[in-house]
Amino acid sequence: MADYDYENIKIEKEDGITWFILNRPEKRNAMSPQLHYEADDALEKLQTDPDTKVLVLTGAGDEAFCAGQDLKLYFRGTADDPVERAKAAHASNSWRWRRLSTFPRPTIAMVNGYCFGGAFTPVCACDFAIAAEDAQFGLSEINWGILPGGIVSWNVADVMSYRDAIYYAVTGDIFDGKRAEEIRFINYAVPKEKLREETIKLARKLMEKNPVAVRFTKEAIRAARHMSLEQATDYLRAKSDALKAADKEGGRDEGMKQFLDDKSFRPGFEPYKRQAG
Ligand code: ACO
């Protein structure tokens, strides 16, 4: 059994959902080098954890999802130590982007409060994002004379429209959860008191589906949008064959049988009944 005993993050597992909680509420969950090392280690273990059917990333406490990089410990604290800075930067990019965006199970960013600067990367890395209506988002880098570095500029150019990305990065204007939904930076915003409940609802919906099909589908969408039509056609044909081979529960045949032979479900409205949980 993996050991998830960390100081700066908290891992809680319940009914197939793994809650991945940034846990420095007194610092608004700002990301220190230590937090990055722990988060990177935890995600490495969780990617092969059979109990994790859906991963939810959120922040501890009522106020913040994550206030971005820790200006004191991440920037000032490593300014004279290039080795530590490089190590911290590597861990930071590894968990916030590489490990999260390729996580084999569905991932949901549950944005419960402040979300600034470097915190945009893990929000974009997650497959889904749900926020409290009053959550506050801000590309605050401009306010202290830097640009959205790491890969934040790339993330917002990818997920937001060009106009919104330039607008929010250059003005540093705050936008709330409702506005984040309106500009499609997140899937939807809900009243804060319903945030957890609505997140669980989405997680359960995802858990009803064939997990191999879910994984291959999210990988296909993520990869195909940066391909030419010719590349995508070829890639999707190969990916479909790979899905069939990887799906040990034979979802495609089972679904067809339940629809065509048993007439026990309509795929237009619901997933086929799975034997395995
Ligand atoms: N880095 C380091 N410490 C932080 C950070 C941060 N990004 N954000 C908050 N903290 C610390 C504060 O220094 C303070 O510590 P202290 O109690 O030891 O003095 C504590 O968290 C609470 O912060 P307050 O400002 O007192 O809390 P408040 O609720 O009034 O405001 C807010 C919260 C809006 C998040 C404010 O702290 C803030 O503007 N933080 C910086 C946000 C930011 O610009 N992040 C982007 C960084 S750039 C990047 O990520 C690349």
Image (tube, helix red, strand yellow):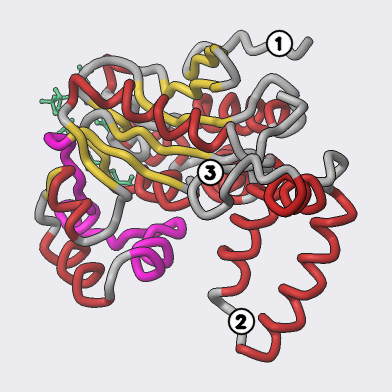
Q: x, y percentage for residue 116?
A: 26, 43
Disc on the earlier residue, 2 or 3: 2
Residue 136 vs residue 190, the one in the foreground: 190
Q: What residue does disc 1 label?
A: 3
Q: x, y percentage for residue 28?
A: 27, 24
Query: Dividing the image into 4 quarters, which one contains the N terminus?
Result: top right
Q: Nearer the viewer, mark 2 or mark 3?
A: 3
Disc on the earlier residue, 1 or 3: 1
Amino acid type at image mark 2: Met
Image point (79%, 45%), residue name: 254
Q: What residue does disc 3 label?
A: 270
Q: Residues within 10 Å of mark 1 (few under 14, many from 20)?
A: few
Cα distance in 3D space between marks 1 and 3: 37 Å
Q: Secondary structure at mark 1?
A: loop
Residue 75 vs residue 238, the one in the foreground: 238
| Label number found at residue 226 | none
Image point (32%, 21%), residue name: 197
Tell whether label 3 touches label 2 (CB within 8 Å): no
Image point (72%, 54%), residue name: 260
Q: What residue does disc 2 label?
A: 227
